[in-house]
Amino acid sequence: MTARVLRGVRPYGGDPVDIVVSEGVICEISSPGSGQGHVIDAEGLIVLPGFVDLHTHLREPGKEDAETVATGSRAAALGGFTAVHAMANTEPVADTAGVVEQVWHLGRRAGLVDVRPVGAVTVGLEGERLAELGAMATSPAAVRIFSDDGRCVHDAVMMRRALEYVKAFDGVIAQHAQEPRLTVGAQMNEGPLSGTLGLVGWPAVAEEAIIARDALLAEHVDSRLHICHVSTAGSVEVIRWAKSRGVRITAEVTPHHLLLTEELVRGYDPIYKVNPPLRTSEDVEALRAGLADGTIDAIATDHAPHPREDKDCEWAAAAFGMLGLQTAFSIAVQTMVESGLLDWRGLADRMSVRPARIAALANQGCEISVGAVANLCVVDPAAQWVVDPSGLASRSQNTPYAGMSMPGQVVHVLYSGEPTVLEGVLA
Amino acid sequence: MKHLLSSEDLTREEAIAILDTAGQLATVAGRSVKKLPTLRGRTVVNLFFEDSTRTRISFELAAKRLSADVINFAAKGSSVSKGESLKDTALTLEAMGADAVVIRHGASGAPYRLAHAGWISGSVINAGDGTHEHPTQALLDAFTMRRHFRGGVGDLSGIRVALVGDILHSRVARSNVVLLRTLGAEVTLVAPPTLFPVGVDTWPCKTTFHIDEILGDVDALMMLRVQAERMQDAYFPSAHEYRQRYGLDAQRMSRLPADAIVMHPGPMNRGMEISAEVADDPRAVIVEQVANGVSIRMAVLYLLLGGMTAGDHGDRKATES
C-alpha cells in the first residue's frame, strides 16, 4: 500500500506540516514538503480528527424511501464524519442482536464511515420491557449506546434498571428527555409565540424535569447517562449542576438548536418542525455557552431524513426532523468558531474527541499524532458555500438551510487511512 | 389584500372598510331579490376539513348572494387521518379554477400554508384553523358591536369588551383580541388559569380569573363555548364548578350595565357557559350575530374578489362624504 501525504496541512489550525499516512495509521508528521508518498494537496487547510456523530437516523431497515445506510454514509463522509451512530427507531426497531448486526453489516458494506448501531432500551421502544441489551453489546456490532430516541424512557423504574444493567458492559443510556404527558400533541416551543400561533406548546419543563430526574437516578446507581439533543437554557443549568455533583452525565446539542429559533415557525412551514422544537434566542445563547464551557459535551446532528410528502403538508400533519450531516460542521463554525466561543481544538473536542469517548470508540477522536488511526477531516475555514437541497447526498431533502450561505467546507476525509472524500466530492 | 388569514392581516382602515362594505351589503338581505351580480362567473370553494354547518352555510349564502358559483368540498379525511393530502386537494381545486378557497381546518396554520405554499393562485379565506384564528367571526362580532354602540360607523374606540371562557383553545378569542385592539376597543379576557395560553400577558388586553370583577364595567360580554370534555384533561374539575365560577346566568346578567349586550359565537352549550334564560334574553344578540355573519362574509368575498381594494373603497367613501 502506497503512503499518502496530506501536504502542508495545519493540525487544529496550527503550523503547517506534512502528515504521512500508511497502513491506515499516521506514520509520520514532518515539515511541509518533506513527506514522501501520494500527495493530497491540503496547503493552508486545517486538519481535525474525523467527526463522530452520536445521533444519526439512517432509517434502514424499514424507511428506505427516506434514507439508507449507504446514502446516509455518503452524507456523513461529505460532512466530515468518520463515525456515526445509527438510531434504533427503524422498522423493525433495533432492539435485538439481529437488527443491530444487520445495520452494522450494511455500514461495513458502504465502507465510508464507522456505522455504530444504537440499541433500543426497551422492546419496540414501547417502554415496557427491557430489550436484550447484553446480546446487542456482545454481538459483532458491539453496541455501547442504548436509546429509545424518539420516545422518552419515562417510567422511572425502567430507566433505573436500564442505567444499572448496562454497567456490566460499560454501556450508556442516551435519554430522549421528553415527559410524555406534558407534551401530548405538542407542536412547538411553549411560550407567547405558541399561544399566538395556536400551536400546542412544548414546555421546557418537559425536558428539564426528565433530565433532573435521570441525573439523580444516574447518581444513585452510579451509572453513565447521556442526554440527547438538549434544547433549553434550563437543561443546560440542570446538567451543569449535575456535573458539579460528580454525576456521570454527558450531553449533546444539535446544530439546528445552536442556530435556529422558534421565530421560524411563524410561517407554519414544517421544514422547521423538529423534536425537540426550536426554542428562543435566549435558549440558543445558553446552549452555545454550555457547549463552550463543556457542560454540553458534543455536537450531534440528529440527522432525520423524511420523504417529501411528510413535509409538504400542513404543520400538524408533518413529521418531526431535519437533515444535519452535511451542514453540521459549517454551523459549528458559524455559531462557535466565528463567534470566538471555541477554537479549532475546541471544535475537534466537541465534534470528535468527546463523542468518541462517550461512545467508547478507541479508534475515533484520537489526537493527531504518529501511531493514531488515520480518521481525519481536512477543512477549508475560508470557504463559503450555499446549501442546495438537491445537491445533498441524503435521499431526502428536508434541510432548513436551503439557500443559506455557510462558512467552512469539508475538503478531504480519510477513513482508516483511505480517502472517502477528496476535493469535496466522494472519492 | 389578497387573502384573509388572520386578524393580524388587517389595518384599522382595512377593517373599517370591510365593516362599511358589510353595512352596505346588509341591505340586500331586506330586498325581495336577495342577490347582487358582483361575482357572477367567479367560483368560490368551501373547503371544510372540519364539520361546521353554520359557518359553511354562512359563507355559501354570502357567495350566492353575490352570484358566485359555490362548490362545497367536505374533505373529511385530512392528511392527518391519511386521506388525501391538503396539497393534492389544493392542486385539484386549482385545476378546477377556484377563484377563492374558504378553508376550515383542524390544524392551526393550514390556511396560511394553503395561501403561501405555491399550490394555488386564488384567494384564501380562513374560516377557522385549529386553535389559531377565525377572522370573519371577529369581523362579524365587531360589526355587531359597532351597530349597537356606534350607529354602524367608525371604529370601536372606548368600547369595553370581555371574553369569558376557554381562551386557550379558542380561535375566536385570538381573532377578537387582535381585531378589537386594532379598532380601539378595550378587551378583558376572563378564564380559569388553566384555560389561558402561556404568554397571554403579552397580548394587548387585560386578564382576570374572576368574572364578577368585570360585570359592572363591560359594554359587550362575549361568552365562549366550553366543552365539558375539557374536564377530563383537568382544565377544571366539573361542569358544575365551571358554571358556578364562570357561567353567565340571570343573576350575573342583572349586574351588567343596562345597555350592555351579551354575545356568543355559537354553538352554545346552554346550561354550561350560558344559561337558557340569558340566551333567550333580548339583550343577547346571538341571532343577530348570525345574520351579520352573512353580510361580513359577503363584504370579504366582495373586497377580495370584486377587483376593488380596501383603499379604493376608502377613497370612494371619502368622495361620498
Image (cartoon, rainbow, N blue to C red):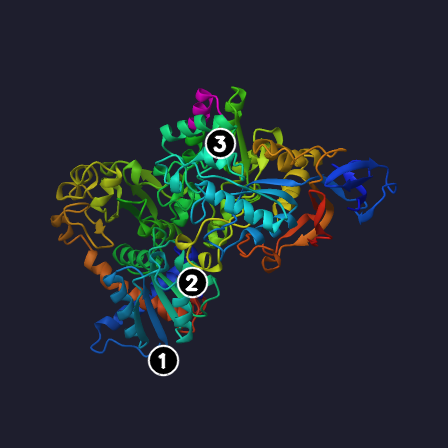
Q: Chain of mark 1?
A: B
Q: Check the image and report above or below for B252 versus B268.
A: above
Label 2 packing within 10 angstroms: few (<14), some (14-19), many (20+):
many
Q: Position of residue A259 (x, y in %)?
A: 57, 43
Asked which quadrant contains residue B92, the reply is bottom left
**Few, some or many C-alpha atoms within 10 Å of disc 3 (few <14, some 14-19, many ≥20)?**
many
Residue type, label 1: Gly
Magenta stretch: helix, strand or loop mostly: helix
Which quadrant holds residue A205?
top left
Left or right? Give the position of A343 relative to B104: right
Circle 2 sits on which residue?
B114
Q: Residue B146: where, in percent of width, then height?
A: 30, 57
Q: Which residue position is annotated with label 1?
A: B41
> Is residue B90 visible in this depiction of the protein?
yes
Question: Which residue carries the number 3 mark?
Answer: A235
Which quadrant would residue B298 be assigned to in this image?
Answer: bottom left
Classify residue A218 as left or right of residue B184: right
Real-space CA distance between mark 3 and mark 2, rounded to the nearest whole angstrom: 36 Å
Identity of the residue furthest to the left in this view: B277
Position in image of residue A338 (x %, y %): 68, 40
Amino acid type of the residue that numbered disc 3 sits on in the rendered structure: Ser
Label 3: state its secondary structure.
helix
Choose between B163 and A187: the one closer to the eye: A187
Tag 2: amino acid:
Leu
Q: Is residue B265 left or right of residue B199?
A: left
Q: How many neighbours does mark 1 have within 10 angstroms: few (below 14), some (14-19), or many (20 or more)?
A: few
Taking depth in this image into account, of A138 and A20 the one nearest to the observer is A138
Measured Cα–Cα span from mark 3 to mark 1: 59 Å
Spot the residue most to the right. Answer: A34
- The range drawn in magenta is A213-226
